[in-house]
Image: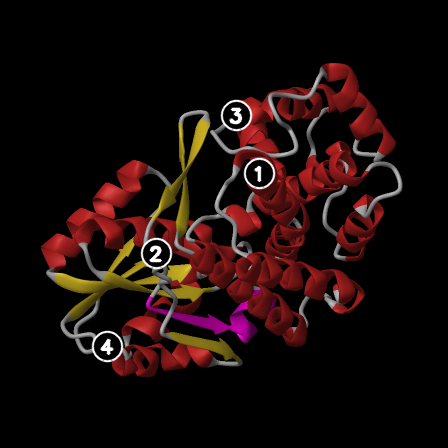
Amino acid sequence: MFGKTTWIKLPRNVLVGHGVVDRVGDAVAELSLAGRPLVVTSETPSAIAGERVRDQFDDAAMTTVDAASFEAVARVVEAAEDAEATYLVALGGGKPIDIAKMAADELGVGFVSVPTAASHDGIVSGRSSIPEGDTRHSVAADPPLAVIADTELMADAPWELTTAGCADIISNYTAVKDWRLANRLKNVEYSEYAAALAEMTAELLVDDADSIKPGLEESAWVVSKALVSSGVAMSIAGSSRPASGAEHLFSHQLDRVADDPALHGHQVGVGAIMTEYLHTGANGEWRAIRDALEHLDAPTTAADLGIDADTVIEALTTAHTIRDRYTILGDGVSEAAAREVASFTGVI
């Protein structure tokens, strides 16, 4: 007898567009959330829109975070308990959203995501990325109850944050290939629907790469929709597989071994170039990924990342040790093979 079940948790409200930061209260009201919110933000987002969000509630508390860490999560949990908050509103980029996501999960309450930069697909996914020492943990949590993405604010964010978000999405190409490979060789559970959605978001940005420009709100609109779609794909899959493969392992390892790591999305983009080469060889689609990243002003080489060639090779040859996730890296890439890949693709 067929006994398979699945439980897909998705945001109930997604509001994207010009000036929607002033409609956070309306979006929350539609969720019928009772009680007092705690707004979790950081210094810059607070200065940009903190009071605009807080003023939409009768009795909102607010706390700021400096860096993503488990200690910061604990402080937000304590602040929420002290304020007797019944739900959280995360305002900002990756740090406030990842921290609020984990804090809400620990508290057993919902949270609302209000991104101010299109820097990664964590704005809507059920995953948090938290560094601890030289390791970065990917932690499962519930996705936000609502996402309110103001394209006006996102268009004004530093361009490098937007290009990092674009590169993160484009890397779905290789993440899905790794997922299919793991399904074939290791019988890892696979969702054709989630994979197709993840690939579609990557194609959207590759096809529109030359029209995504700094300061253009229309570009922020395109990128925001892609980030939402990628996050939904992960929720459907029940894992980060649709958007995280060998290219993410490479980035996480760079975070450990590089003296001054670059933005996560930028590292993932460079990793995707090399991972695509490993999947499809010299005549594969790695050039299309590289060209799209170049159109977006995103890094395509180790020099662009500000990381030396030897560190890139070290990360590529040891990335398979990051977590128990089967990818094209298998049980490791030799140094000679890594240098060939990185040299042929122009990464080093």
- Residue 80 seen in this snapshot: yes
* Residue kind at label 1, given as amino acid type: Ala
Residue 48 appears at what percent x and percent y?
Answer: 44, 66
Q: Which of 334/117 is in front?
A: 334
Residue at horizontal 84 percent and vertical 28 percent from the top: 343
Q: What element carries label 3?
A: helix
Q: What element carries label 2?
A: loop
The residue tagged 1 is: 182
Residue at horizontal 69 percent and vertical 33 percent from the top: 306
* Residue kind at label 2, given as amino acid type: Met
Residue 113 appears at what percent x and percent y?
Answer: 38, 64
Q: Distance between the residues labelled 1 and 3?
A: 25 Å
Q: Distance between the residues labelled 3 and 2?
A: 47 Å
**In the rendered view, does 166 fall on the left or right side of 25?**
right
Q: Which of 60/10 is in front?
A: 10
Q: Of discs 3 and 4, which sits in the foreground?
A: 3
201 over 344 or under it: above or below: below
Residue at horizontal 30 percent and vertical 49 percent from the top: 102
Q: In which quarter of the image is residue 108?
A: bottom left
The residue tagged 4 is: 57
Specify the label residue 319 is tagged with: none
Q: Distance between the residues labelled 1 and 4?
A: 47 Å
The residue tagged 3 is: 256
Q: Of discs 2 and 1, which sits in the foreground?
A: 2
* Residue kind at label 3, given as amino acid type: Arg
Specify the label residue 1 is tagged with: 2
